[in-house]
Image (cartoon, helix red, strand yellow):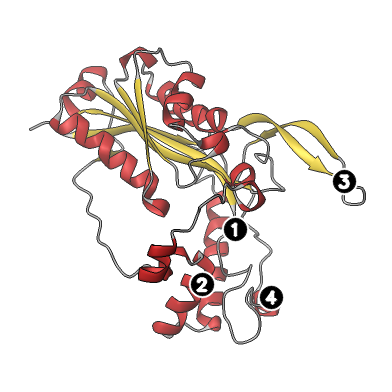
Amino acid sequence: MTDAVIVSTARTPIGKAYKGALNNTEGATLLGHAISSALSRAKVDGAEVEDVVMGCAMQQGTTGTNIARKALLRAGLPVTVAGTTIDRQCASGLQAIALAARSVIFDGVEVAVGGGGESISLVQNDKMNMFHAVDPELLALKGDAYIAMLDTAEIVAKRYDISRERQDEYSLESQRRTASAQQGGRFNDELAPIKTTMAVADKTTGAVSYKQITLSTDEGPRPDTTAEGLAAVKPAKGPGFTITGGNASQLSDGASATVIMSDKLAAQKGLKPLGIFRGFVAAGCEPD
């Protein structure tokens, strides 16, 4: 039986949404950069790729109408390469990789690309299309399908008795580990620095200007984080709640891609697999 192996991976550094370096980078350019970088590292020509599968949870605007296809064209791949976009919300990128791998195992595809990306800066909050966003019948049947992740986090914390102190402790350890990994160059092999144009808003006038920038490291980590600092951050939903800007994930822009091929082709090319796809299973639960 054919094995689907991952032979290379590349990702943009993760940018802070709205205020970060990728706040003005178009979806096709963002995801295309990850695709082209991953292919370059594997020394695989774009024409060898049969299909590109990318995950995206916010498929509208700059990341709408099959962003995978647009991204592969932006990456310089020929029009003979197909593309499709997957939405399983937070697991979209993983689902995309699984689908690409299965095409290698079961459908005879020799080379595929799987990954994902989001441009929160350009599609979320005031940029979202909210026209008929809520189905009244579903709202009445299962209204929790529409609650925000912040509300879900508070429900989970209460249901499983995860205190604010435990959350802050976990966050502090996460920051420490990330800082150590950055200092030790642990992320260097996966990062693909990107040159782009950043939008900068004047704090006084609100006027927006643009500047050329190269993002080479993740913008989110805060190595100077302390327990005292985390404890001082107020909960986002107010007194009595536990989720804060210190113990929750930031809103981010970024993209990642992996090159997946049959184990036989990888051996022919002399490529050492980073991993082998064995399987992927999803399970449903209450939407809250």
**What amino acid type is highlighted by mark number 3?**
Asp
Residue at which label 4 appears: 233
Location of residue 288 with respect to 31 vertically, above or below: below
Location of residue 10 with respect to 87 vertically, above or below: above
Residue at which label 3 appears: 202
Where residue 124 appears, as percent x and y from the top left, is 60, 49
Where residue 277 appears, as percent x and y from the top left, is 22, 41
Q: Say whether marks 4 and 2 touch (CB < 8 Å).
A: no
Question: Can residue 190 be seen at all in this image of the molecule?
Answer: no
Of the two numbered discs 2 and 3 on the same chain, state the one appearing first in sequence: 2
Left or right: residue 253 versus residue 197 is left
Q: CA distance from mark 2 to mark 3?
A: 32 Å
Of the two numbered discs 3 and 4 on the same chain, state the one appearing first in sequence: 3
Of the two numbered discs 1 and 2 on the same chain, state the one appearing first in sequence: 2
- Which of pointers 3 and 4 indicates the residue nearer the eye? 3
Secondary element at image label 1: loop
Residue at which label 2 appears: 151
